């Protein structure tokens, strides 16, 4: 909107200097510099269409004020003005969480232009490897005509050309069928990750200038996040959340160093070593996104251990705990099966349940067929 109002007034002071002060009725006020009696001028820009009560005073150099003069100003929307969506803020997205730890995202948007016959706040959620293994409840918000939660696989949603398509990511939308100038709305939803990995949350606000002609205006102006494109072809801000597995026994700590072992194949391979009291063995392997792997110190296939073991698997890039198992096999031995969230190096750590558990072990592992 940003319509500018100019006010002039004759101000006098018989024995000194005087200024013109204005309260513009929208929380802002300003004033002129001190000077002699004169015709003074003030300007103000209104961000939204509304009726405002404006109050003026003359103020001398001692701070003495005149009787106030008040008037009403009706600021109207310019005919034919396009909507101007503004993504005001995105909050509640953590940098890291554990599997099962929920967080609530709030997205706030405002229309700084003409009325929109279809304004919306949009968000999509999925893992970086394409997985949809995440629970999302909501959205909630006031002032909306529709609050939509579409899972991956839902048809139809519409791309930026207004063509129907099948949802690849979970899509959340809050729609106002008459989003007028100056209106500000917030949409919230709660996310509960169900697996370790990198979870992506993409956000935007989009407003229609003319629905039948597919004339939409998009905004992604918040400084946080990184620029990206969503499943519908719109520019968005993308936020990444590192989701770590929960520690299964004692304290799980990403090792500072690790030695490479042969990468898993579909045939069982083994790695044998010995750990001292309070120590551990850490091995680096290269894994592919979307493939399932098993690492174990029991349950057959050559796996064994002289002690009560715990197996931890870490993303070697972020040191996020990806998987953990204690007592998954006979005699307190361990077995962990997980799907790699990204193609990169991972560290497999074998340790004793506590300092009294140590000795030799054979780790068996493979890429599951």
Image (cartoon, grey):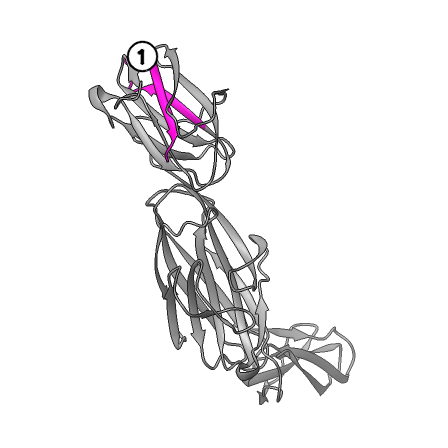
Question: Looking at this view, is 232 or 269 the one in front?
Answer: 269
* Residue 252 visible here: no
Q: What SS does tag 1 mark?
A: loop
229 sits left or right of 291 in the view: right
179 sits left or right of 7 in the view: left
Q: Which quadrant of the view contains residue 217?
A: bottom right
- The percent coordinates of residue 172 (x first, y second) are 42, 64
Q: Is residue 114 above or below residue 343?
A: below
- The percent coordinates of residue 203 (x first, y second) are 50, 60
* Residue 270 visible here: yes
Number of numbered tags placed on the structure image: 1
Question: Looking at this view, is 37 or 232 the one in front?
Answer: 232
Identify the residue at image location x=52%, y=33%. Answer: 317
Question: Looking at this view, is 365 or 201 the one in front?
Answer: 365
16 sits left or right of 359 in the view: right
The residue beneath circle 1 is 358
The reply to whether the magenta stretch includes residue 213 is: no
Q: Is residue 108 above or below residue 334?
A: below
Magenta portion: prevailing SS class: strand
Task: Write down the region rendered in magenta.
Answer: 347-369
Q: Is residue 257 above or below residue 198?
A: above
Identify the residue at image location x=47%, y=51%. Answer: 200
15 sits left or right of 320 in the view: right
Q: Which quadrant of the view contains residue 310?
A: top left
Q: Quadrant of the C terminus?
A: top left
The reply to whether the magenta stretch includes residue 351 is: yes
Identify the residue at image location x=38%, y=69%. Answer: 148
């Amino acid at each position: 909107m940003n319509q500018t109002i100019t006010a002039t007034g004759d101000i006098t002071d018989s024995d000194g200097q005087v200024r013109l002060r204005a309260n513009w009725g929208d929380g802002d006020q300003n004033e002129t510099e001190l000077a002699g009696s004169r015709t003074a001028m003030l300007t103000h820009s209104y961000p939204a269409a509304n009726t405002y009560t404006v109050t003026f005073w003359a103020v001398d150099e001692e701070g003495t004020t005149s009787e106030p003069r008040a008037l009403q100003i009706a600021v109207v929307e310019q005919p034919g003005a396009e909507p101007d969506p503004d993504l005001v803020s995105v909050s509640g997205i953590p940098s890291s969480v554990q599997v099962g730890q929920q967080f609530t995202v709030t997205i706030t948007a405002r229309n700084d232009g003409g009325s929109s016959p279809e304004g919306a706040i949009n968000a999509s959620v999925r893992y970086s490897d394409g997985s949809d293994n995440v629970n999302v409840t909501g959205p909630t918000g006031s002032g909306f005509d529709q609050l939509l939660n579409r899972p991956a696989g839902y048809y139809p949603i519409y791309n930026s050309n207004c063509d129907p398509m099948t949802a690849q990511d979970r899509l959340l939308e809050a729609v106002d069928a008459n989003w007028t100038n100056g209106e500000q709305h917030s949409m919230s939803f709660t996310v509960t990750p169900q697996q370790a990995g990198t979870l992506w949350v993409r956000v935007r606000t989009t407003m229609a200038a003319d629905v039948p002609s597919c004339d939409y205006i998009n905004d992604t102006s918040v400084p946080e996040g990184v620029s990206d494109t969503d499943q519908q072809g719109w520019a968005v801000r993308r936020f990444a959340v590192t989701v770590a597995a929960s520690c299964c026994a004692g304290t799980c700590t990403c090792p500072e160093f690790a030695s490479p072992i042969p990468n898993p194949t579909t045939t069982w391979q083994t790695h044998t070593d010995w750990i001292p009291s309070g120590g551990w063995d850490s091995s680096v392997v290269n894994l592919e996104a979307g493939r399932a792997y098993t690492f174990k110190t029991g349950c057959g296939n050559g796996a064994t251990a002289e002690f009560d073991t715990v197996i931890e698997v870490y993303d070697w890039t972020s040191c996020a705990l990806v998987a953990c198992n204690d007592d998954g096999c006979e005699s307190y031995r361990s077995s962990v099966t997980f799907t790699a969230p990204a193609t990169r190096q991972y560290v497999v750590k074998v340790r004793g349940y506590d300092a009294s558990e140590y000795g030799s072990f054979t780790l068996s592992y493979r890429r599951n067929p």
